[in-house]
Amino acid sequence: MAKKNDGKVLAQNKKASHDYFIEDTYEAGMVLTGTEIKSIRNARVNIGDAFATIRNGEIHIHNMHISPFEQGNRYNPTDPTRTRKLLMHKAQINKLLGLSKQEGYSIVPLKIYIKNGYAKLLLGLGKGKKQYDKRDAAAKRDAQRDIQRVLREKQKIAR
């Protein structure tokens, strides 16, 4: 029987697509305590300021805020933004390490979701956008919105 949050996005980093060109995505598991997973299932997690690093062949996520569980016990972590280990295959970590060493690339968390009862984190390999890239993307988005608005008005008139 599937859980109620299975496949549902619990947290999303909308700022990442604004600040980075996402070139590739990877799925990673997370090492969590029992009360942390309960808070994640209640969508009490924030990945807006989070970032990932690779040290000693292991990948860790920093500044991911998981609120303490209200009905938690003594195993509730005292620091909600503690560094958490991510679970990935060694070949994926080595590939990410090589790609992220290039100038301008970084590993950015994109979203957290539940898959088969386990919390997963979608990581993206992102290249930082310049200010003019952000303005260009906003202009394209506005132009597309105007085109859609005109098409909807024409369809209303045609009826």
Image: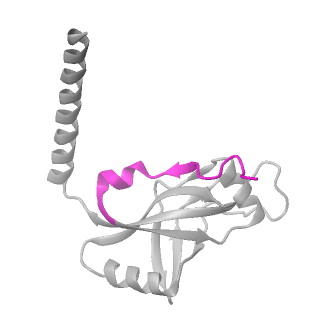
- Residue 68 in the figure: left or right of residue 137: right
Q: Which residues are magenta?
A: 1-23
Residue 123 appears at what percent x and percent y?
A: 45, 66
Quadrant location of the C terminus in the rendered image? top left
Q: Residue at x 85, y 58 (%)?
A: 73
Residue 141 or residue 129, whichever sits in front: 141
Residue 142 or residue 155, whichever sits in front: 155
Q: Residue at x 20, y 46 (%)?
A: 137
Give the quadrant of residue 23.
Answer: bottom left
Measured along the vertical axis of the image, is residue 41 above or below residue 100?
above
Q: Residue at x 65, y 52 (%)?
A: 6
- In the rendered image, residue 104 lying in the magenta stretch gets the answer no
Measured along the vertical axis of the image, is residue 106 above or below residue 89?
above
Residue 144 appears at what percent x and percent y?
A: 20, 35
Residue 10 appears at what percent x and percent y?
A: 58, 49
Outermost residue toward the front? 159
Number of marks drawn: 0
The answer to whether residue 83 shows anywhere in this view is no
Residue 134 appears at what percent x and percent y?
A: 21, 49
Residue 158 or residue 35, whichever sits in front: 158
Measured along the vertical axis of the image, is residue 34 above or below residue 155?
below
- Residue 115 in the figure: left or right of residue 108: right
Q: How is the image coloured?
A: one colour
The answer to whether residue 156 shows anywhere in this view is yes
Q: Residue at x 50, y 87 (%)?
A: 90
- In the rendered image, residue 15 lying in the magenta stretch gets the answer yes
- Residue 97 in the figure: left or right of residue 147: right
Residue 21 or residue 70, whichever sits in front: 21
